[in-house]
Image: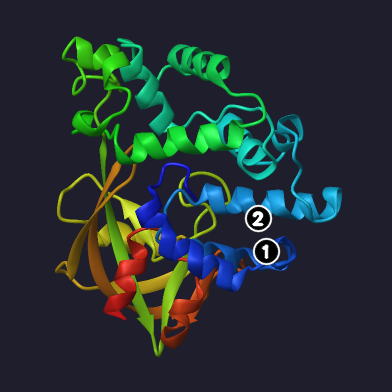
Amino acid sequence: MLQQTRVEAVRPYYENWMEHFPTVEALAAADGDEVLRQWQGLGYYSRARNLHDSVKEVVSRYGGRIPAEKSELLTLKGIGDYTAGAISSLAYNKDETAVDGNVLRVFARLYGIRENILSAKVKKKVTELAREQLPEGKAGVFNEALIEFGALLCIPKSPKCGECPLRHFCEAKATGLEKELPLRITGKDTPTERYAVLICRKSHTVLIHRRPSEGLLASMWEFPMVRCDQPHGDGAGLRHYLSGQGLVVSVEETVTAELKHVFSHKKWDLAVYEGRYVSGELAESEVWRWLPVEKYAALPWAGPHGKLTACL
């Protein structure tokens, strides 16, 4: 959960998660939709799917005990260098580094690294520096201290240099670059995608669609939506889209609601329409469903579509 998400945001989700899945075996046995639903709100849903897959492997391959060796951890889905190092050092006190964003920032300032912190070159350099200073037999304490130091003192925008025990050894502080470092160069603007979304009613049900099993918000549920170029939606595009699924629907002319949602790499602008079923039958499919309104809370919803359930 702490991959790309701060501790303060994670804590309530973690506590809820542990209530639902208190053991490795409980999580491995859980339904995929239930796993995604309990993760809902944290974003980056591939983390939940990867965790679920990895836990199943831990149960089948390792008898329910998470492996201690970094090399074995790296074979599990969704576990990269940082997570493997963190588990190995923090849980088993193995002599492994755990370089996350906090540690990258600390070393970039401490050593005055004036290169893009997002580059593989800098990540490798910082990992080597951390490994050189790793105290044998105390890797867990060392890694946790570095991560906490970056989270509490050497923070991103306004580092607390006056309280820092390393300020006399810090290259960034000595050169007045503590607020400029680390350098983060993304090289691209965040694109905006516009969609028209339909809340289509049939008696006491609404039409929903499951997203593909790969890609953004994989396997999450959403209301039918189509990409549109105009800023105020596209009701005709929605009718045409659903006719391809075997349905005739009516769509109101005016937009009911507008929503914006920001991902790490793109933005969505959603124009929401109300509509009603007229005739036709959905083709046999696992990705379309008429959902009773009272059951919406049992499903994992894709991003902003969860907010739209308030319109039901």
What residue is drawn where x is 67% and y is 41%?
77
Label 2 crowd (10 A; few <14 / some 14-19 / many >=20) = many
Q: Is residue 45 above or below residue 142?
A: below
Give the left or right position of residue 312, taking residue 61 as reference: left
- The residue identified by callout 1 is 27
Viewer-nearest residue: 112 or 182: 112
What residue is drawn where x is 55% and y is 37%?
141
Give the left or right position of residue 250, taking residue 14 as reference: left
Viewer-nearest residue: 302 or 50: 50
Q: Is residue 240 above or below residue 171?
A: below
Give the left or right position of residue 71, taking residue 303 as reference: right
Q: Residue 260 lies in what quarter of the image?
A: bottom left
Q: Secondary structure at mark 2?
A: helix
Give how far across and how far down residue 144 sits, in percent.
50, 38
Q: Is residue 302 above or below residue 26?
A: above
Q: Residue 252 lies in what quarter of the image?
A: bottom left
Q: For residue 128, say whether it is visible.
A: yes
In contact (CB < 8 Å): disc 2 and disc 1: yes
What residue is drawn where x is 73% and y is 35%?
75
What residue is drawn where x is 32% and y is 14%?
169
- The residue identified by callout 2 is 52
Q: Type of residue at label 2?
A: His
Q: Type of residue at label 1?
A: Leu
Give how far across and how far down residue 279 sits, in percent.
42, 79
Q: For residue 277, say whether it is visible.
A: no
Among the two numbered marks 2 and 1 on one chain, the one whose residue lies closer to the N terminus: 1
